[in-house]
Image (spheres, coloured by chain):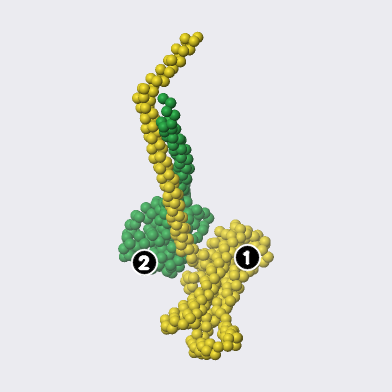
Amino acid sequence: MKIFSLAVVLAPPGKTCTILSSASDLSTFSFYQRGSVAEFMAFFTKTLSERTPQGQRQSVQENNYVAHVYNRGGAEQLAAVLIADQEYPVRPAFSLLTKLLDDFVAKVPQASYANANPGGITFSEIEIYLQKYQDPRQADAIMRVQAELDETKIVLHKTIESVLERGEKINDLVDRSNALSMQSKMFYKTAKKQNSCCLIM
Amino acid sequence: MPVQDRTNEFRACVESIRNRSSLPARAEAKQRLLQTRGRGEGSKSELTRMASAIGKDISSTNIKLGKLSQLAKRKTLFDDRPVEISELTYIIKQDIASLNKQIATLQAHVKQRKQQNTAKTSESKQLEEHNHNVVMLLQSKLADTSMTFKDVLEIRTQNMKESKDRTEQFMHSTSAATSQAPQNSLLFAHTQRQDPMGDGSKLRFDSKGKSRAVTPNNGDILAMDLTSAEEGTASHNGDAFMQMQLVEQQNDYIQSRSTAIESIESTISELGQIFTQLAQMVAEQRETVQRIDADTVDIASNVSGAQRELLKYYASISSNRWLMLKVFGVLIVFFLLFILVS
């Protein structure tokens, strides 16, 4: 369940795309493969963003990677690409892409990339996102809520079991206190009887 | 059961009852009743007309729904007719919406008539009740129809999923290639999509052509294709698969989000139920605990009472020296007697 690379691309329709900002985690590859893998991913990113129409989401599978593309279009004509392995769940991938694009649009002014000049853009959050979303269960809001709810449900089940045990013990107690009350009553009666009748002495 | 017009039967009943009773005054009253019925008939029959029209529409919608459910239940892999099914679904949806509106107008009419009609005669009350019942009947029938519609749609989605799984099973080794092929064919064929809802009919032919071009090139797809009867069905199969994929892609993200959120909602409601159960159990146990409390108080009082008695006894024993002296005196006398005798 790993993300290999995450990129924001300027994707004007019909023209070539330029990668504005990208981050990648190639630690699983051997040192000598990393260069070519990074090139491949950059090429893949560019090709996919060119081939995805605006306002469209797509997932493409290649060998054992899956690339999720979201071309947002809009005024800035941005697209985001996420390359991950096959296990990574699809829905949080797309929500991550949407979030990334929104963040990018908020942080980086349009003028710095409008002329397809990626040199001047600093968007360090992309690295942070990449690291954070390596475990989607914690990072994605919906999955996190679901996980917490499941935990709570487990806790509640344990609570109910202990309440049931408590119920049993309380039943036991009530029986015993009943018996004790009977016995103390007999004791009292006997003691009283001692006092009143048979004035032997 | 469509709304039936039984005015003729009613008239026949009135005639027979009038013939049976011999009082002319009653006959006059009945005559008047019939006349008022006749006057009111104009607007009443309008309501009946509307109601019968709605009933007819409901029955025709039910027939269409029957056809749709038959189509949806077919589990064949190859003969699926999604265009027809989606058209029929659309038509039925429209029908249900228009029926809803008609029933709403009918109900408004009924309410209006009820407000207009200030006479408190029993017959007008019966009329109102009858109209109200008719509206209820139509609404319940419409509700049944929409429930059946929903069930049919669910069956349809299930079957689509099953057939997709089966095609994946048969063409598993090629699923990677086919999932790429549509991408390539889309990307090559279109730069612009006109119908984002994925009606599918346009793309079908394009991707069908492309899939014909792509599928025979790959060796193992051809081997798999030999299991199906003809290449046409195989490409149709892949085509249906691709088309389903297209439709799925359009809605997938949003649907998956909504399902995830629905599951969260259901989990939360389950949690709520668990909490109520917990509260209930604790409340039951509180009662038992109160019993235990009462019992312990009883025990305490009993034991203290018994202790009091014992103390009294002990006091009486230790203070009652006269009796003791007497008893010991008697004993000593007996001992002396025994010793003296022996």
- Residue B315 place in picture, x, y as percent: 35, 27
Quadrant in which residue B82 is drawn: bottom right
**Along the line of sight, the residue nearer the viewer: A179 or A118:** A179
Q: Residues within 10 Å of mark 2 (few under 14, many from 20)?
A: some
Marks 2/1: CA distance? 46 Å
**What residue sits 45% from the left and 35% below the top?**
A186
**Along the line of sight, the residue nearer the viewer: B256 or B207:** B256
**Closer to us: mark 2 or mark 1?**
1
Q: Which chain is green?
A: A
Q: How many marks?
A: 2
Which chain contains the residue that carries disc 1?
A: B
**What residue sits 55% from the left and 65% below the top?**
B154
- Name the residue carrying label 2: A76
Q: Residues within 10 Å of mark 1 (few under 14, many from 20)?
A: some
**What residue sits 55% from the left and 72% below the top?**
B145
SS at mark 1?
Answer: loop
Q: Chain B: what color?
A: yellow
Proximity of marks 2 and 1: CB atoms separated by less than 8 Å: no
Question: Looking at the picture, does residue A83 appear above or below residue B26?
Answer: above
**Along the line of sight, the residue nearer the viewer: B54 or A175:** A175
- Residue B130 place in picture, x, y as percent: 51, 79
Going by the numbered disc 1, the residue's amino acid type is Lys
Question: Looking at the picture, does residue A158 appear above or below residue B41?
Answer: above
Query: Quick check: B86 left or right of B271?
Result: right
- Name the residue carrying label 1: B75
- Whether residue A17 is visible to the viewer of this picture, yes or no, is no
